[in-house]
Amino acid sequence: MAPPVANVAVLGSTGSIGTSALEVIAAAPDTLRAWALSAHSSCQCLLAQAERFAPHRIVVSDPVAAAEFCWEDLPPQVELLTGPEHLETIAREPEVDVVLAAIVGSAGLRGTWAAVEAGKTVALANKETMVVAGPLVTDLANRTGARIVPVDSEHSAVFQAMQAGRREEVKRIILTASGGPFRRHSAEQLAEVTVEDALRHPTWDMGPKITIDSATMMNKALEIIEARWLFDLEPDQIDVVVHPQSIVHSMVEFVDGSIVAQLGSPDMKLPIQYALTYPRRAPSVATPLDFGEAMSLEFEPPDEERFPALALGREVATSGGTAGAVLNAANEAAVERFRAGELHFTEIVPSCRAVLEQHDFDPSPSLAELEKLDAWARQEVLRWACL
Ligand code: NDP
Ligand code: MG
């Protein structure tokens, strides 16, 4: 029997994940349909997507950007909604089957939350949601029956590899990390890193925030926390190994010592497609791996001294509570300040640690408390940098 068509709401359709997702959707018109799309302020790009995909609704979450743009070419059957609250509107729509959470940062939390609350299948790229509010989100999903399928390549790999055994047979997971562009940099070289250097990733083509997170290895720290809540693992069951080729996307070790890995070319279309079509698999739109060419796969332990983000990630995964929200917001603010030329590359992680150590820890916060702390931590990063 042919699979039914899944209506997809793409939150963040103009970003790196969002545009890759639309390529996946375009390649499968019989099974996937773009029902709703959203951008923050990239109105021109969103308009072009609306013309091509004819969704029912589009959302521009920045109302000022929406008001300044000329929408006369918008196809009349496409409804335009403006303001961040409408991310929740499209995430909850009864006709929507799958919500792809592809907004960057904690700005993605509300839309993802609405999708989980509405019991949707959530294809989760926005790792910040799990970092900020992992236990609240998984608890909500258990109550509503929402299914969360990871898009982050490492977590998609773990999700797939876990199917080779029973949950209680999992000993640990091993997240792979490319090591970023500064894998071989000395401490002195790291201190000299410019924004341009940090935006050049060796294997993945991604949005600017996650590219800088990869360079500091904060991305891996966030992924440790994401994995902790997504898979309900203890922090000491989550290891990291540097694998510069980004071919092995992550591994699961079972109690008998067998390690199951998932491999593929470093192309986000692969985990996006898996999340959108799960539990089915569809013919790939990504370039397949070619074993006809000689290929080396290397693995090495990460250098925790040069990349102190990893220890921070493990600490936050262990603390839980408010720690994830504070780390995430501090990091978002620090990355912005680095991009604005106001912080050195090597100040990003220490500024996050300083803010984390100052905060008033609560082991079981509400969503409202987490949002308050998010705003507080951003302010603290501004103060820290001025000292
Ligand atoms: P991009 O910066 O490329 O895109 C971000 C998207 O979010 C854009 O559509 C943008 O709209 C929208 N957006 C930005 N700010 C806001 C806001 N305040 N409110 C609402 N929407 C907003 O990011 P990526 O695609 O790289 O990353 C998206 C998420 O996926 C992140 O959480 C990232 O960690 C995760 N991820 C990304 C991977 C990748 O390969 N890129 C890999 C694994 C995970 P506009 O264009 O209008 O600014
Ligand atoms: Mg990843």
Image: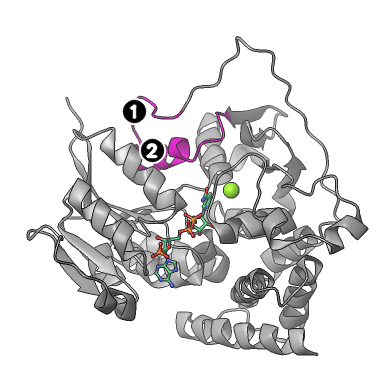
Residue beneath the point at 52% across and 63% down = 130
Q: Quadrant of the N terminus?
A: top left
Residue beneath the point at 63% across and 83% down = 377
Residue 373: say if magenta: no
Are circles 2 and 1 on residues that touch, CB within 8 Å? yes
| The residue carrying mark 2 has its beta carbon less than 8 Å from ligand 1 | no
From mark 2 to mark 1, how far is it between C-alphas? Answer: 8 Å
Q: Quadrant of the C terminus?
A: bottom right
Residue span colored magenta: 263-286
In the rendering, at what x and y percent does residue 99 appear?
Answer: 32, 55
In the rendering, at what x and y percent does residue 249 appear?
Answer: 61, 36
Q: Residues within 10 Å of mark 2 (few under 14, many from 20)?
A: many
Q: Nearer the viewer, residue 266 or 96?
A: 266
In the rendering, at what x and y percent does residue 349 appear?
Answer: 76, 69
SS category of the residue bearing label 2: helix
Q: Which mark is residue 282?
A: 1
Q: Nearer the viewer, residue 29 or 98?
A: 29
Q: Which residue is mark 2?
A: 273
SS category of the residue bearing label 1: loop
Determine whether 205 is above or below 104 in the image: above
Residue beneath the point at 38% across and 38% down = 273
In the rendering, at what x and y percent does residue 176 appear?
Answer: 68, 41
